[in-house]
Amino acid sequence: MRDKPIDNYIARFPVGTQEVLREVRETVVKAAPDAEEAMSYGIPTFKLNGKALVHFAAYKNHIGFYATPSGHQEFSNELSQYKQGKGSVQFPLDQPMPLDLIQRIVLFRRTEIHKIKQ
């Protein structure tokens, strides 16, 4: 189900950034079709079984992607080329968005959350 507040969030940004945000959103939806869309901490969030799957946000020069520390730890080698914080990574807007990597991170987090449920 599409979350109207996420649509409103995306609409606040320049057209080029909106396109990238939509691509990130669609990548997450395809990787975790059972996840719920929501807004949390003022940014688009996907939840699975009541737990945060991933968050993303737009900034002037990058897309912030938040997959909790575990998603970032699992893909630390591939994420090492990007600026990071604890549980966050910055994908520059002037570079191709690593949608394949985002998809793999979401799939990892999805599996991780499903294991917790069992």
Image: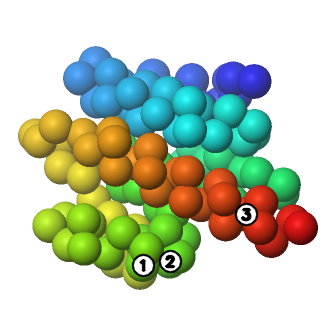
Q: Amino acid at mark 3?
A: Ile
Label located before the other in sequence (3 or 1): 1
Label located before the other in sequence (2 or 3): 2
Residue 83, horizontal then vertical, whole percent = 20, 69
In this figure, which residue is indicated by the disc labeled 3? Answer: 113
Q: CA distance from mark 1 to mark 2?
A: 6 Å
Residue 108, horizontal then vertical, whole percent = 55, 59
Within 10 Å of disc 3 (Cα), the crowding (few <14, some 14-19, many 20+) is some
The residue located at (34%, 42%) in the rendering is 100
Can the viewer see residue 55 in this picture? no
The residue located at (24%, 52%) in the rendering is 91
Residue 36, horizontal then vertical, whole percent = 75, 39
Q: Label 2's element?
A: helix
Q: Is the residue under label 2 in contact with that under label 1 (CB below 8 Å)?
A: yes
Left/right placement of residue 101 relative to residue 69 reads left
Q: CA distance from mark 2 to mark 3?
A: 13 Å
Label for residue 73?
1
Nearer to us of marks 1 and 2 is 1
Q: Amino acid at mark 2?
A: Pro
- Residue found farthest to the top: 15
The residue located at (19%, 65%) in the rendering is 82
Quarter of the image containing the N terminus? Answer: top right
Q: Label 3's element?
A: helix
Q: Amino acid at mark 1?
A: Gln
Q: CA distance from mark 3 to mark 1?
A: 15 Å
Relative to 14, residue 48 above or below? below
Q: Is the residue under label 3 in contact with that under label 2 (CB below 8 Å)?
A: no
In this figure, which residue is indicated by the disc labeled 2? Answer: 69
